[in-house]
Amino acid sequence: MFLLVVLSAGFVFAGFKVIQKAKDICNPIDLKKKCAPSLDPFTYDSAKLSRITWQKKPIKMETEVPLSLFGSYRFVFNTEGMPKKIGINVYNKDKDSKKRDLLFSNADSLETNTTLIFDPKKHTRKIFINYDVPADTLNLKIKGCVYFVLGYK
Amino acid sequence: MIRITYPLLALSLVLFFGSCGSDSTDQNTDLGQDTTEVVDDGQGQEQTYLLPSPLQIAYIFKKSGLKYVSGTTHDPKKEGNYNTTFSQSLNLGIYSSDLAYCVLNKQNNEARNFMNAVKSLSDKLGMSAVFDSESLLKRFDANLGNEDSIMFILSELQSRSDEFFADNNRQMTAAIVFSGAWVESMYIAAKVSGKGKASKLPQQLADQMGILENLLKELKNHESKDSGIAGLIGQLTEVRDIIAGIPGVKEMMESENPADVKIEATDSQLDALVKKLDEVRNSLIKG
């Protein structure tokens, strides 16, 4: 009985720690500093911190990024703030389009790889970043964040 | 009885140490609020729009051949004329574009004046922290003439402003500031590029349509919060409609290879566009 309660408490504690860790590392100032080396030699343009709470059903978050045909760009994603992996997929068209091309995905990337870099080769007018958050089927109430920085040159 | 007390004691200790850590965590979290909170809207979907920095727009124009012409920028001495948050925000954007245009064209004295105007309006909007108690201004002065350093300082200013808007939940102000910056950039491009077959203005403006679309969507998200936004949306929509009417622009917007689509505007179309940009910009700087 004693062992069971201690083990349960340990799990609760671990759960708290995971949530705390996610909160700690969702500070945009720290995340910006961490992303800076990956942005080089591109110049900072804009950034977006998306704080994500897993829901009972899957969530799709889309960010529309306008690009200039005269510029070159770098997309840097930092996922240190996500306790569990989510899908990061970049397309040439929005989520309502019938036919769109996948330009970048973290599907094959290891969960431990928390910095992802994408340099679009082909010029498009807009790029659509999708964060695909799986359903929280076990009701773990997972919270975290993804930091995205856009650089140009 | 003892068998129950030990587990409870263990659990209490675990929870105690767990909660000790969370106080300091919450303090840290307050420094960096999120820009996007996913709220279950019943659809499980959320759409947001990214707006670029005025510096990037100025850089793109410069890269596509836009020259410096004296007298096209707004008067930095007029920064004191703006007394509402709305007009201050718009003109902060306008001066930010002018600053970027001067820096990229090595107009150091003018750049210094625009930096002062940007600082003054930022202070009025409660954004003094962005300048970090004058240190950013001192670094700007010390590096005038060194384009790389100045570009770095301006991108840092942009980054700090982005953090300020996010931390203080002032996305509406960010959208209004960017509206001013975008209009000023287009106004300068229209004034400097001129007309004729050699003019790059149609391509430059068509290239901006993606940004304008995002800006309009972002402004519509805040339309009910400030009475000035509806008017701004109306003005920007008129600009968008003129650009969209230029042959090639719609094709470019739908094309898989937009860089291959030729944009050809007649002089009368360019005249109409320049006139509209003049009208919109003048109404913004009037305050």
Image: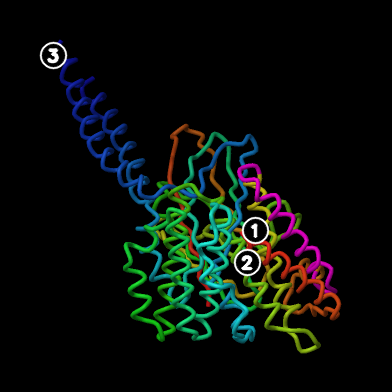
Q: Which residue is mark 2?
A: B182
> Which region of the structure is painted magenta?
B224-249
Relative depth, front residue between A10 and A123: A123
Quadrant the N terminus of chain A occupies: top left
Q: Are marks 3 and 2 in contact (CB under 8 Å)?
A: no
User: Can you identify the residue that label 1 sits on?
Assistant: B215
Q: Label 2 is found on which chain of the structure? A: B
Kindly identify the amino acid type of the residue bearing the numbered disc 3: Ile
Q: Tell me the subunit letter for badge 3.
A: B
Q: Is label 3 in a helix, a strand or a loop?
A: helix
Can you give x and y, in whole percent of width and height, for residue B63 in the image?
Answer: 60, 83
Left or right: B268 with respect to A57? right
Calculate the distance from the C-alpha at mark 3 to the C-alpha at mark 1: 66 Å
**Residue B2: mark in rendering:** 3
Q: Amino acid at mark 2?
A: Trp
Residue B36 % position (x, y): 51, 47
Estimate how packed mark 1 is, as few (under 14), some (14 to 19) or many (20 or more) residues with alpha carbons within 10 Å: many
Q: Residue furthest top?
A: B1
User: In this image, B84 relative to B255: left or right?
Assistant: left
Residue A5 higher or lower than B38, as above or below? above
- Do residues under tags 1 and 2 come within 8 Å of each other at their CB atoms? yes
- At 71% from the left and 77% from the top, the residue drawn is B190
